Amino acid sequence: MVCFQMAYSIASGTEFLGFHVNKKPVLLVQFELSVPQMKQRCILVHRNFPKTHVNVAKLSAEDMMFTELWNKIKDTIDDLGLRDGVVIVDNIYSSSSAKLSDNSDLQSLLSMIHMIKTKTGNAIVLIGHHNKHTNHEEEPMLTKGLIHGGKHLTNYVSNVFQIGDSTLGTDLRRGKITKIRDEYCEL
């Protein structure tokens, strides 16, 4: 839901998590949810943003199985003519066959992402996962070391915002900003 809230906040220029947002065109590329789940989330979030348009990539089952997905993302950006906008990809792990734990695989993926970002002027938001921890009874500290893709990935990105489960309740989450680069931020 945070991903959808971010997309609609940026597309409408509405504050997100207390931060000022510049209104930009948005493309949401979703690999986590089924089409019905995605529609349901869009409907829920859209209620609070009734006049806001978010582009949602429509990837077929064939796209998901037989295409290098970042080429498909690039083609979708080009087809939409999306420039100086924001592309939100949920999630980086499912967006490629690259092994995020292998620095050479990850470097190739980050090079492709950088090329798309540079050629289109779009900011890229990558949603990722934490590495699995073994003790489910405790809340691990939210640190960059938990992120699947490790230091190589977190060194590349400009900002890192982490969300983790809470042992206080199944409907509660914890959030922490664990990296802010002082230089220009596309968002």
Image (cartoon, helix red, strand yellow):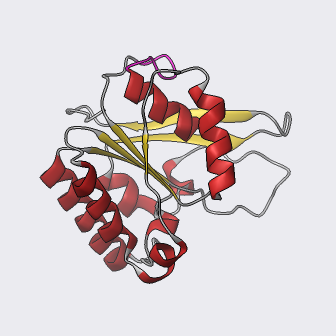
- Image height check: is 179 above or below 153? above
Magenta highlight range: 13-19
Q: Nearer the viewer, residue 160 or 43?
A: 43
Residue at 60% x, 30% y is 45
Residue at 59% x, 38% y is 42
Q: Is residue 181 left or right of residue 16?
A: left
Q: Is residue 27 left or right of residue 142?
A: left
Q: Nearer the viewer, residue 53 or 72?
A: 53
- Image height check: is 76 above or below 14? below
Residue 165, image x, y percentages: 73, 43
Residue at 25% x, 56% y is 79
Magenta region, main secondary structure: loop
Residue 67, image x, y percentages: 39, 78
- Image height check: is 52 above or below 73? above
Asked if the stretch drawn in magenta spans residue 143, the answer is: no
Residue most extreme to the bottom: 66
- Image height check: is 111 above or below 25? below
Q: Is residue 103 left or right of residue 2?
A: left
Within the image, what quadrant is residue 43 found in?
Answer: top right
Considering the image in quadrants, where does the N terminus appear? top right
Instruction: Using the rendered image of the protein, determine whether residue 1 is visible from the camera's viewpoint.
Output: no
Q: Nearer the viewer, residue 44 or 116?
A: 44
Q: Is residue 115 left or right of residue 137?
A: left
Within the image, what quadrant is residue 31 found in?
Answer: bottom right
Considering the image in quadrants, where does the C terminus appear? top left
- Looking at the rendered structure, the number of numbered marks drawn on it comes to 0
Residue 84, image x, y percentages: 20, 38
Instruction: Using the rendered image of the protein, determine whether residue 67 is visible from the camera's viewpoint.
Output: yes
Residue at 54% x, 37% y is 4
Residue 163, image x, y percentages: 61, 41
